[in-house]
Amino acid sequence: MRSDGTSRPIFDGLRPAFLAALVALILSKGVALLPGLAPDDYVRILEHTPANFFLAQGRFTEALVFSLVRRFGLSIHDVWWASLALLLPVTAAAIAAAVRLAAPAPTPLAWLCVAAGLAGSMAVGADILLFRTAIPVHSVCWLAFLVFLTAAYLPWSWRRRTAAQAVAVAVALGGYQPMLGLFLAVALADLARIPGGWRERLASSVLPAFVLGVCLYIFIAVGLGVVFGVGSNINDRGGAITVGDLPARAALLMRHLLEPFGQRDPATAALAFPLLALFVSAVLLLAAWRAPGRAAWGVAILLAVSGAVLLPLMLLKVVWMPGRTMIAGVFAACLVAAMLAAVLPRAGHVPLLALGVLASAAQAVGSSRILLDQQRANRWEMARAAAIAQDVLAAHGGRRPSLVVLVNHGWELVPRHRPNWYDRNTTSLAIPYSASGVFHEATGMVWQVRTARGLEPCRTSPAWPEQGAIHPRADATLVCFGPGD
């Protein structure tokens, strides 16, 4: 029992919720157990990513994970499968614990399972699994999240429990900053469930530990940056935009927020987002009819988590939109459903639960589509790279040139792969820093490959794969794909 006496024993209803979340995770993201390569993965196979790259972005946990893997003589690509095998049950346990923490007594078991299934199947969570070499650090982040949740039930003193939870928050944010929204959703749901005044709520909730953990994260991230002399200038991902850039960034965010859902993103395509939105809206409306105060808490949680998601997007140099940041919003919606289930009219339980199951199934289809598209993209780009490499070697009498430049290629998007969102379904052959990795994976040889447009020999050259499309030069070998602009 929690010391505040507001919850049932932790294992009451936790196991079925865990199984529901695990089944949803496997059905929606089991494809990730097959090998797959995102643009960053191609690079990390070829070369070690320095710790300063991550420290400059405040990702000190990821820097530590990469450094430890290298210390044991391994590549980060060697451990992704074992990490994913750990990630799936750990994530299921964390989801079940979060749903269990948010749901007051008495909450029907079916609602715990549906909420856990919705959280496990969320399509936006598939985005992070596209990057196989990032899975090890995500396993650490979700393990820290699980520690944060289960520590609330351990028979520790308030000081010891709060310290452990704060460290867990800092560790998770040091690996993946969008975890902030998940912690915030849990902290607010826990705060809403505890009876009494604000002083009693704060004394018994996990919110103080969350705030302390965020402060600890900022202290460590800034401190390590100072100690190791790294700054946002080490790469274009760290740091914040300037004041003058704020109007343009606000316009960008509004354009994407107002864009019709499902237009380009399989995470919200077809019925996935409308069904989830309808489910959460119906829960809020019915709860507002019977318990307006609790429904107001639900709306406040959704708004607070949305703000926590949008604020970094508003200020940081790189905008990760929308999937990798929307994960917290979907997670918060599932917690709100669990939190309000006990006050819903019994007549509405069956249709709402059925709607939740349909939304979970739609999300699972969207998740699988994201990961299956990556499989097809990898096959397409490696086959094309192997064919280009064969022709280049033939033009050089079997000798591999020092540099290959792909000129005026027209395959930013993998053919017939829709929808597209930023680097999803964008072939790695079209990205300068990953093209060399594609050639390496396709041929087993190390290549130096660049992309370019508008080079003179290609303005009148045949387009590959026609004869005469390859132009050996002293400084580089050009492969022309058309005249360009």
Image (cartoon, rainbow, N blue to C red):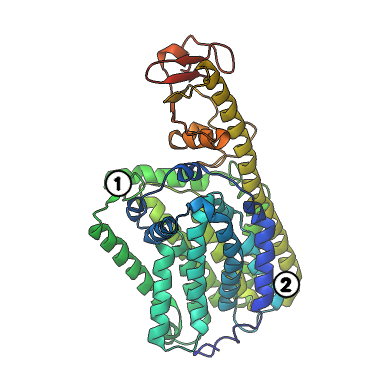
- Above or below, 353 against 381 in this view is below
Residue type pointed to by label 1: Ile
Across and down, in percent, residue 23 comes to 69, 64
Residue toward you, 141 or 307: 141
Secondary-structure class at tag 2: helix
Residue toward you, 186 or 449: 449
- Above or below, 110 against 161 in this view is above
Residue type pointed to by label 2: His
Residue at (73%, 71%) from the top-left corner? Answer: 348
Q: Earlier in the sequence, mark 2 or mark 1?
A: 1
Kindly tell me whether residue 274 is visible in this rendering: no
Across and down, in percent, residue 77 comes to 52, 50
**Residue assigned mark 1:** 234
Give the CA distance from mark 2 to mark 1.
53 Å
Secondary-structure class at tag 1: helix
Across and down, in percent, residue 436 comes to 47, 34
Residue toward you, 295 or 223: 223
**Residue assigned mark 2:** 349
